[in-house]
């Protein structure tokens, strides 16, 4: 069983390049501090170099790449000291998004939350590879962000969620109960799907805290 995020009917070449390169960076397919070859990326994505360069400018704002004059563009390092900063932001914003989703999600979205929780119950995460586990994690969070109904909050959480995912990917192989972290999404989704914003807020806060504890335990 796999998960695929829905995309708009029309995606520009620059957006296509941005999404593809972003995913390679946050899944560490492009390793931290690796040099970015825009020509090679353009060929692999079947787009021109201009969309790739536009994408890299956006990714620099996202703190996923950094450019140096006369040296080129590189994937940013994953600095474990960033964990405290990322967790601080997520600890305040993730519960807010979960609460808002529980308060304002429409009937179609509430059904989506319940169905997604049922899907998660059937997934054997121990049998999945790292990328597939992380794609589930990202998908669940992005569904919640979207349902929160605040595009600025959604953009901010996606950005810092991506940074958290890079940290998670580095330590995932050393975590003995990583599937527990992913399965915490089920109760969160059910709280939102049953329109219980207080419970959704509480679970979202504990979820961020457990992520922080899990990473620090294997550092």
Image (spheres, rainbow, N blue to C red):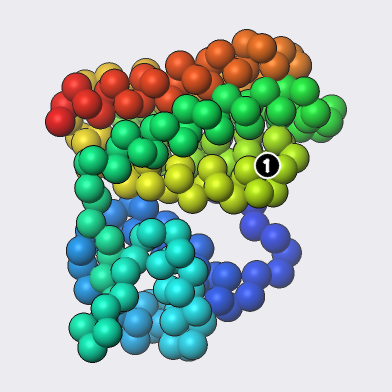
Q: Residues within 10 Å of mark 1 (few under 14, many from 20)?
A: some
The quadrant holding residue 16 is bottom right
Label 1: state its secondary structure: helix
Vertical placement of residue 132 versus 112, above or below: below
The quadrant holding residue 199 is top right
Q: Nearer the viewer, residue 105 or 159?
A: 159
Vertical placement of residue 133 versus 12, above or below: above
Position of the C terminus, as image quadrant, is top left
Residue at left offset 34%, top offset 86%? 39
Q: Which residue is mark 1?
A: 146
Vertical placement of residue 44 versus 112, above or below: below
* Residue 76 left/right relative to 156: left
Q: Position of residue 183 (x, y in %)?
A: 45, 20
Residue at left offset 49%, top offset 50%? 159
Residue at left offset 47%, top offset 33%? 90
Q: Position of residue 200 (x, y in %)?
A: 62, 17
Q: Position of residue 112 (x, y in %)?
A: 71, 31
Q: Position of residue 72 (x, y in %)?
A: 26, 81
Residue at left offset 46%, top offset 16%? 206
Vertical placement of residue 210 versus 43, above or below: above
* Residue 141 left/right relative to 161: right
């Amino acid at each position: 069983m796999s998960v695929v995020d829905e995309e708009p009917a029309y995606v520009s070449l620059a957006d296509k390049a941005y999404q593809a390169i972003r995913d390679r960076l946050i899944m560490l397919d492009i390793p931290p501090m690796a040099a970015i070859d825009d020509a090679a990326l353009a060929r692999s994505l079947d787009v021109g170099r201009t969309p790739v360069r536009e994408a890299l400018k956006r990714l620099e704002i996202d703190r996923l790449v950094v450019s140096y004059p006369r040296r080129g563009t590189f994937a940013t390092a994953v600095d474990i000291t960033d964990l405290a900063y990322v967790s601080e932001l997520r600890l305040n914003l993730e519960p807010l998004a979960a609460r808002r989703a529980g308060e304002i999600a429409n009937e179609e979205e509430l059904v989506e939350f319940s169905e997604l929780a049922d899907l998660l119950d059937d997934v054997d995460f121990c049998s999945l590879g790292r990328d597939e586990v992380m794609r589930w994690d990202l998908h669940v969070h992005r569904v919640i962000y979207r349902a929160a109904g605040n595009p600025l909050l959604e953009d901010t959480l996606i950005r810092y969620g991506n940074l958290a995912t890079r940290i998670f990917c580095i330590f995932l192989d050393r975590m003995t109960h990583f599937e527990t972290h992913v399965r915490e999404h089920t109760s969160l989704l059910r709280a939102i799907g049953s329109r219980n914003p207080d419970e959704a807020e509480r679970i979202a806060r504990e979820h961020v805290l457990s992520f922080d504890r899990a990473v620090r335990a294997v550092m």
